[in-house]
Image (cartoon, rainbow, N blue to C red):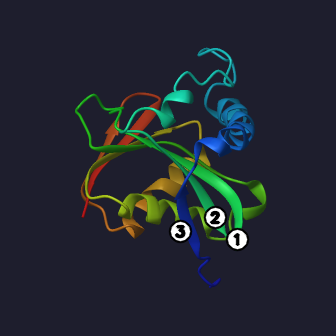
Amino acid sequence: MRPEISVTLVPVPLADKPALKAMLDPYLVEHADVADPERRYGDPARYPYFDVYWTEPERTPLWILAEGERVGFVLVNAHSPSGRGTDRTIAEFFVLPAWRRRGAGAAAARAALQSRPGQWELQVYKTNPAGMAFWPRAIAAAGARDWERLDLGEPVVHRFRMG
């Protein structure tokens, strides 16, 4: 068993907005290549909510730091993919390829989910087998309760309580 990687989540300051955008755009293309290869939903690099992560209080952009370097990001908001209402949602989650399968993603997911109590949701596409395998393990490791798996066709929404 590999040793646990220690990660820290820190808010992305406005000054780091270009650096986050530089990491977000390739992630969005990579995600679309898996979840929307026909580009039914348009250009994946057009992320209409990016700017409001620094102006709307229910949105939080976070850096994932490991060993003193940025290894990814988490975008948290209050949009409910299920339509049933939620306190928090992991909208986007990305770990640089060099840090994948080393425990950084699991540690970051656990830290994000344990950061605030309340009702959480996150959506995973069935066309993303890595995400479909990762998120149930991460949610369980974070200590979620009252967990529901809502099959909405292509996406699956995980709805659960933290704290």
Within the image, what quadrant is residue 114 found in? bottom left
Vertical arrangement, residue 135 with respect to residue 4, above or below: above
Mark 2 vs mark 3, CA separation in Å = 11 Å
Say which mark, if any, is on residue 107. Answer: 3
Say which mark, if any, is on residue 50. Answer: none
Q: Which residue is mark 1?
A: 68
Label 2 sits on a secondary structure element that is: strand
Q: Residue at x 24, y 64 (%)?
A: 163
Three-letter amino acid code of the residue under disc 1: Gly
Residue 73 percent across, percent down from the top left: 60, 51
- Left or right, 19 with respect to 48, comes to right
Could you tell me if residue 107 is visible in this image?
yes
- Left or right, 130 with respect to 124, comes to right
Report the front residue among 29 and 62. Answer: 62
Residue 2 percent across, percent down from the top left: 65, 83
Q: Residue at x 63, y 84 (%)?
A: 3
Report crowding for label 3: few under 14, some 14 to 19, many 20 or more residues within 10 A (C-alpha).
many
Report the front residue among 22 and 82. Answer: 22
Q: Mark 3 or 1 closer to N-term?
A: 1
Label 1 sits on a secondary structure element that is: loop
Report crowding for label 1: few under 14, some 14 to 19, many 20 or more residues within 10 A (C-alpha).
few
- Left or right, 97 with respect to 156, comes to right
Q: Mark 2 or 3 closer to N-term?
A: 2
Q: Residue at x 71, y 33 (%)?
A: 25
Three-letter amino acid code of the residue under disc 3: Ala
Circles 1 and 2 in contact, beta carbons < 8 Å? yes
Q: Which residue is mark 2?
A: 65
